[in-house]
Every structure is written in C-alpha cells, then in structure tokens.
Image: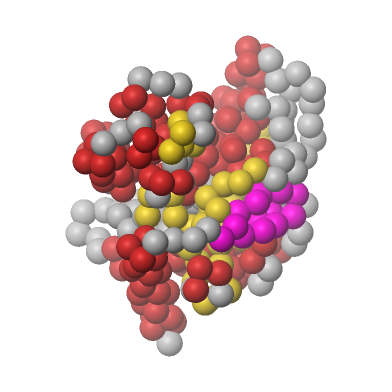
Amino acid sequence: MPICRRKVTVIGAGNVGATAAQRIAEAGIADVYLVDVVDGLPQGKALDLVEAAPLQHHDQMIYGTNDYSDTTESDVVVVTAGLARQPGMSRDDLLLKNAAIVGNVVGQAVRYSPNAILIVVTNPLDAMVHVALDVSGFPRERVIGMAGVLDSARFRAFIAQDLGVSAGDVSAFVLGGHGDMMVPLPRYSTVAGIPLPELMKADRIDALVQRTRTGGAEVVALLKTGSAFYAPASSVLHMVDSILNDRKRVLPCAVLLQGEYDVQGLVMGVPIVLGAGGAERIIEVSLTATEQAAFKASAESVRGLVSTMASARS
Ligand code: TXD
C-alpha cells in the first residue's frame, strides 16, 4: 500500500477516537496522533495499533500522547473528547461539561495547528460545533460536525436490509440536527437511482425513518454501557478521506448556516461538498412545507442549546 505522511490528530482515545484512529491508519491515508487527558491511554492504544500494522499491511505511524505540542501542523483534527451522560445528569449538565472539554481541547489543538480542518464528533453535536467555531476563530469552512454521515449510513443500512439489496446501491439523504430532531428525506433517497417511494410503501418508509432517528439509542439500549462507535468511526474516516484526498464528496455534515435554508447563525446538518478546503460549498435543495417545518423545529432545538451555553457564560 502507498504510504502517506499527512497528519491527523484524534482527540479522545475512547471508543470512537481509537476506532477512528485505527480506520484512518489502516486506510493508509495519514499518520495519526491520538491524544487524551488520561495518561497512558492514548500511548497504550497507539502502541497496540502499531503492533497490528505488520498484519494489516500498512506503514502509517500511530502516536499516543497527552501533549498537544506533538500534534503540531496537523492537517485534520478530530474532536471526540467528552463525557457520556451519567445517571442523574441532565442533558444540560452534559452540554455544559462537554462544552468546557471541547473548548479546552480545541483551544490547545488550534494553537499548534492553525491551518487544520476541525471535525467535531462530541455530543451534543451541533452545539459542540458552535463551541469549536467560537474557540478556534476558524472560518466556517474549517469547522465541520460529523452526524449526517452516520445518520444517513444508518438509514442506508436499514433500507438495504429491508429490500434485500446492497447497501452500496442505496443513497440516503438526512438533514437537520443530530438526534431525535433529524430530518430524513425519503424522496431524496434512492436505490441505484430509483427514488425510495417507488420501492417501498409509505408506512414501511416511516418505520425506517423512525428507526434512523432513534438509531443511536437503539445501540445504547443493547450495549447498556457506552454508545455506538464502529459506524461513527467509519463516518469520521469518510470525512477525513474526502478532505485529505480532495474528493469533493457530497456528504451531509453539520456546518454554520448563514442564510442557507433560511437559517442564520446556527449549525445544522446539510449536504456539503467536502474537499481540501473543508466545507467548500453548501448545497441547497427545495423542501416541501412539511420538510421545511421539520427543519425549522430541528433548528430551534439547536438554538435552545446555544442559548443555554450563552446563559451559563454570562
Ligand atoms: O454522531 C455523532 N456525532 C456521535 C457522537 C456518534 C457517536 C459518539 N458521539 C459522541 O462522541 C459521544 O456522545 C461522546 O460525546 C463522544 C465520544 O464518544 P466515545 O464513545 O468515544 O466516548 P468514550 O469512549 O467515553 O471516550 C471519550 C474520551 C475518553 O477517553 C476520555 O478520557 C476523553 O474522551 N476525554 C478527554 N480527552 C482529552 N481532553 C479532555 N479534556 C478529555 N476529557 C475526556
């Protein structure tokens, strides 16, 4: 496999971060710097991944560190650091705790990599993209949230299973904020170019849409401890690959809207062209009145989180 010495930093060596590091190194697209606040954790996981390299046939380096100066001049920084919700912790508690963590790690990372593209993964996703935008001072093109790639992969997987067709032939379209408020759009979802409503009855589509909305919770309920990480890590790989190889893939990602979709100053999931410049273009599609209403409701839930963070600061 060809070797590539571009540099990707992954902050947070937990389930998503370590698995994303593995995927990126094994894809042969960059060396990976894994960072965590816990001493030994990123070093141990990096060492384990390095020891797998001869068997996985790649020559990428994976370094573990607690020191951001090692991450100097990263091309891409992926932020997965944060806490999961603990018993007794409200969503707002998680919001404020993770806002503090994301603010801290982004501040340190951008000091050493002022030209990097940031991919934010930590939940609540859309709100954490706002924190990363504020702290980094980066233009919106270089601060991008990962959620839509995962949500649409889930929708694709469910459609493929239901129809008994290859998931690779299914293309799905999901807009809006991450979580329950996401807006899957069946009429823009296709199987080998055939619109989904041609292939599936409305009630079946509705069931898959609902399953997609609660896709994260379904995994959490089964695992009992922790949340999904294989598909989230694959989603991160897709985004990193599109950036590093300037593929200009059209992917649903969370970016700051400045008038697009009639939304001003809020981070929302929309289709973008993702290339070497980051979010190079936002693609606007026409929405029906119902879809527009669902998108607005999703935007309002993000606005609520942003104002909770603002009141906590003042
Ligand atoms: O679609 C999406 N965006 C998501 C988001 C899909 C899956 C997971 N999603 C969220 O990602 C999840 O709700 C969490 O907020 C993050 C990370 O999930 P993960 O499952 O990887 O959590 P872990 O395994 O608990 O790992 C978090 C790591 C852990 O090793 C901590 O020690 C570390 O984050 N951490 C820190 N690292 C560096 N610096 C600081 N301050 C720090 N605090 C915690």
Q: Position of residue 89 (x, y in %)?
A: 25, 61
- The secondary structure that dominates the magenta segment is strand
The outermost residue toward the front is 198
Q: Is residue 201 left or right of residue 138?
A: left
**Going 58% across and 30% down the picture, which residue do you hit?**
23
Q: Is residue 262 left or right of residue 119?
A: left
Above or below: residue 16 compared with residue 170? below
The outermost residue toward the top is 55
Q: Nearer the viewer, residue 161 or 275?
A: 161
Above or below: residue 51 compared with residue 35? above
Question: Which image quadrant is residue 108 in?
Answer: bottom right
Above or below: residue 248 compared with residue 190? below
Is 149 a magenta residue? no
**Going 31% across and 33% down the picture, which residue do you hit?**
200
Q: Is residue 17 visible?
A: no
Q: Position of residue 68 (x, y in %)?
A: 67, 53
**Going 39% across and 61% down the picture, which residue do you hit?**
288
Q: Is residue 180 visible?
A: yes
Q: Position of residue 72 (x, y in %)?
A: 75, 52
**Going 59% across and 37% down the picture, which residue do you hit?**
237
Above or below: residue 276 compared with residue 300? above
Is 277 a magenta residue? yes
The outermost residue toward the bottom is 314
Q: How has the structure been colored for display?
A: secondary structure
Q: Position of residue 210 (x, y in %)?
A: 26, 45
Q: Nearer the viewer, residue 291 or 258?
A: 291
Q: Is residue 225 left or right of residue 35?
A: left
Q: Is residue 46 left or right of residue 82?
A: right
In the rendered image, which quarter contains the N terminus? Answer: top right
Q: Nearer the viewer, residue 24 or 186?
A: 186
In the rendered image, which quarter contains the C terminus? Answer: bottom left
Task: Give the magenta part as a residue range.
Answer: 272-284
